[in-house]
Every structure is written in structure tokens, then in C-alpha cells.
């Protein structure tokens, strides 16, 4: 007669597992912040990519000159003029350093030295970009000139160079 009272109990049923959808409000906030961060990073990357496009184009032109230099298909005058033209277009037009537009000779070489943080343009192989290129006989160190120009292009930054140059002028 003394029946076991535990026999009258029903089995244990586990509750239903919670679904993953809809997520809790904290997950919505975290997802929103991640999306906003990705959007912001994408815009910054696109702005940087667009702003550095002229620098990349100038590097490609100078690399093309270096390749032509290996095959010696370009004369010295054309190399010097093209290097000077690339630098003028990049600095004056693309990077908006308008004060460099009317500079030539020693002023131009000093400005290039300031931008590259070297003295390769006033005292080195880059000095040919000044008045020396207009002489009837001039000697050109092609590899040295192209190395100077490449070094300058690696130093030039689309914002910092303009600010540095405007502070020193």
C-alpha cells in the first residue's frame, strides 16, 4: 500500500532550444556599428586610392622610361624632358602645388630637394633638370637621374608634401 510517490511523477522535458533568429538587440547594434565602420573604411580607402592615382601614374611613366633606357631606344634629351614634364605635371597640376609652376633652374631644383629630403637635384645627377639640360653638350647619368626621380616619387605624398612645401616657402 505504500506506493512510491516518485512513480506518479512525469518525465522531465527539456525546454525548446532558443532560435538564432531574431538576434538580441545588442547583436543588431554590433552589426550596425560594424557596417558603419566598413562603410567608413571603404570611403577612406577609395579617397586615398583616388588621390594617389597621379603618383602611381607618374611612377609607371618613370618605370617605362627605365625599361626604355635598358633598350637605349630613347635619347638623352627626351629622357630629361620627360622626367621634368612628369614631375611638373604631378606636382603642379595633380598635387596642386601652384607655386612650383613658374619655378625653373635653381629654384626648381631646390624645391625638388626639399620634397625629396636629399641634395640629389642640386648637387647630384638630378641637377640636369635645371638649366644644364639646355646646353648643347650635356652629360647625363640616366640611371642616376631615374633613381633620383623614383626616390622623389616614393617620398611624395598627396597631402603631406603640399603641406611641407607650403610651410617652408
Image (cartoon, rainbow, N blue to C red):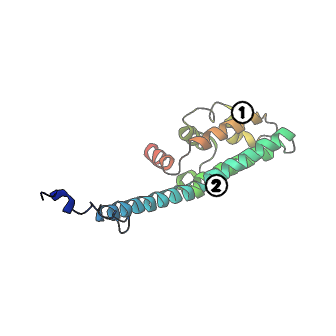
Query: Does 53 sit above or below residue 115?
Result: below
Residue that protrudes farthest toward the front in the picture: 1
- Figure quadrant of residue 69: top right
The N terminus lies in which quarter of the figure?
Answer: bottom left
Is residue 44 or residue 169 the one in the foreground?
44
Q: Is residue 113 visible?
A: yes
Does residue 11 appear to the left or right of 41 in the view shown?
A: left
Sequence-wise, which precedes: disc 1 or disc 2? 2
Helix or strand or loop: what does disc 1 sit on? helix
Q: Position of residue 127 (x, y in %)?
A: 67, 36
Label 1 Cα crowd, 10 Å radius (few <14 / some 14-19 / many 20+)? some
Is residue 3 or residue 121 the one in the foreground?
3
Please name the residue shown 51% across and 59% down the image: 47
Disc 2: which residue: 89
Is residue 47 or residue 40 the one in the foreground?
40
Is residue 135 or residue 110 the one in the foreground?
110
Pointer 1 with pointer 2, Cβ within 8 A:
no
Does residue 16 appear to the left or right of 135 in the view shown?
A: left
Q: Position of residue 15 (x, y in %)?
A: 29, 63
Residue that protrudes farthest toward the bottom in the picture: 22
| Residues at marks 1 and 2, CA–CA distance in whole angstroms | 21 Å
Disc 1: which residue: 144
Q: Position of residue 121 (x, y in %)?
A: 63, 36
Does residue 6 appear to the left or right of 108 in the view shown?
A: left
Please name the residue shown 27% across and 61% down the image: 11
Amino acid at each position: 500500500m505504500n506506493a512510491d510517490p516518485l512513480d506518479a511523477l512525469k518525465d522531465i522535458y527539456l525546454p525548446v532550444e532558443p532560435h538564432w533568429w531574431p538576434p538580441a538587440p545588442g547583436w543588431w547594434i554590433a552589426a550596425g556599428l560594424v557596417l558603419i565602420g566598413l562603410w567608413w573604411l571603404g570611403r577612406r580607402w577609395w579617397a586615398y586610392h583616388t588621390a594617389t592615382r597621379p603618383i602611381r601614374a607618374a611612377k609607371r611613366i618613370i618605370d617605362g622610361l627605365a625599361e626604355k633606357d635598358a633598350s637605349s631606344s630613347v635619347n638623352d634629351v627626351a629622357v630629361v624632358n620627360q622626367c621634368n614634364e612628369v614631375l611638373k605635371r604631378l606636382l603642379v597640376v595633380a598635387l596642386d602645388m601652384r607655386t612650383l609652376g613658374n619655378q625653373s633652374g635653381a629654384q626648381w631644383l631646390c624645391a625638388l630637394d626639399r620634397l625629396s629630403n636629399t641634395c640629389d637635384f642640386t648637387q647630384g645627377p638630378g641637377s640636369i633638370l635645371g638649366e644644364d639640360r639646355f646646353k648643347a653638350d650635356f652629360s647625363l647619368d640616366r640611371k642616376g637621374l631615374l633613381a633620383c626621380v623614383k626616390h622623389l616619387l616614393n617620398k611624395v605624398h598627396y597631402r603631406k608634401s603640399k603641406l611641407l612645401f607650403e610651410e617652408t616657402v
